[in-house]
Amino acid sequence: MNCADIRKLIHAWADDELDLVRSLEVEQHLKSCPACARERDAIQSLRDALRQNDLTFRAPDLLRMEIRKLAHADEPARDREDAPSGIQLWIWRLLAGGATAFAVLMIFLRLGISGREAMLDEAVSDHVRSLQANHLMDVASTDQHTVKPWFDGKLDFAPTVRDFAAQGFPLIGGRLDYLNGRTVAALVYGYKKHFINVFVWPSATATATAPVLETDRGYSVINFDADGFHYCIVSDAEGKALSELAGLIGR
């Protein structure tokens, strides 16, 4: 086995999930490879740290008693007016499980209240990746009549494409990207020395919404709905410039 093979198996080895033959192969490699041995030591150190007493949480006795009562109740919880909801029961069971369950609960709650933040972060990541990977455009053109037809057959919708060069936002191309769980159109505009990504996909509602300016990691992001499409504009340009572009798109 080489190092790449070992690193795919080392976590399973640390958790005693490998068969005897694989375990022996991993152990033999670890004896002769200092780099993989250091990774093994790091995994073991993390496991030891998580077992420390100061990371352990014991549920209060009262809470444990209440959970036992619920577990052995004669009638279904949903038939009692004072019964906790399903989510309350789920939370109590997590708390009774200790620190690891509590951490999972925190992650769950975070995801539950930050769907918009997650999309904001994803949009900024897509923008940054398009610049870093030298994949800003699949079709490079300042002609809207060249960019718009390029999307035909590649998407299940036809994005509106317009050039705003006269207003200081020249169209310079477009590409396909992935955002908010689906393939979207990414229209690329210029503004002074900045690139602006305008992500477009069908809106969930036909109602137009006002542009909302937000920031993430120093980037300006504007989301709004217009003409049956959702627009997500991202750039390191100032928010005022993005608001101006949003106004042009939404007309």
Image (cartoon, grey):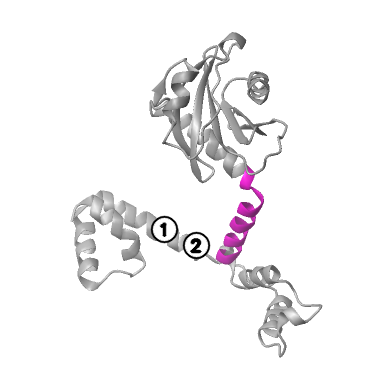
Under mark 2, the amino acid is Leu
Relative vertical location of residue 144 with respect to residue 130 in this rendering, above or below? above
Stretch of the chain drawn in magenta: 100-116
Image vertical order of residue 91 relative to residue 120, above or below: below
Question: Would you say 26 lies left or right of 63 here?
Answer: left
Task: Assess disc 1: are there few (<14), some (14-19) or many (≥20) residues with their C-alpha within 10 Å of its C-alpha.
Answer: few
Residue lying at 65% horizontally and 32% vertically, measured from the top left: 227
Relative to the observer, which residue lies in front, 109 or 60? 109
Q: Is residue 205 above or below residue 16?
A: above
Q: Which residue is mark 1?
A: 45
In this rendered view, identify the residue nearer to me: 202 or 94. 202
What secondary structure is marked by label 2?
A: helix
Q: Earlier in the sequence, mark 2 or mark 1?
A: 1
The CA span between labels 2 and 1 is 9 Å
Q: Which residue extends farthest top? A: 166
Which corner quadrant of the image does residue 167 belong to? top right
The residue that appears at 29% across and 60% down in the rendered structure is 9
Amino acid type of the residue tagged 1 in the rendering: Ser
- Residue 101 within the segment the image draws in magenta: yes
The image position of residue 232, as x and y in percent, is 59, 32
Residue 133 visible to an observer of this rendering: yes
Residue 60 in percent (x, y) is at 70, 74
Residue 172 in view here? no
Closer-to-camera residue (198/55): 198
**What quarter of the picture does the C terminus occupy?**
top right
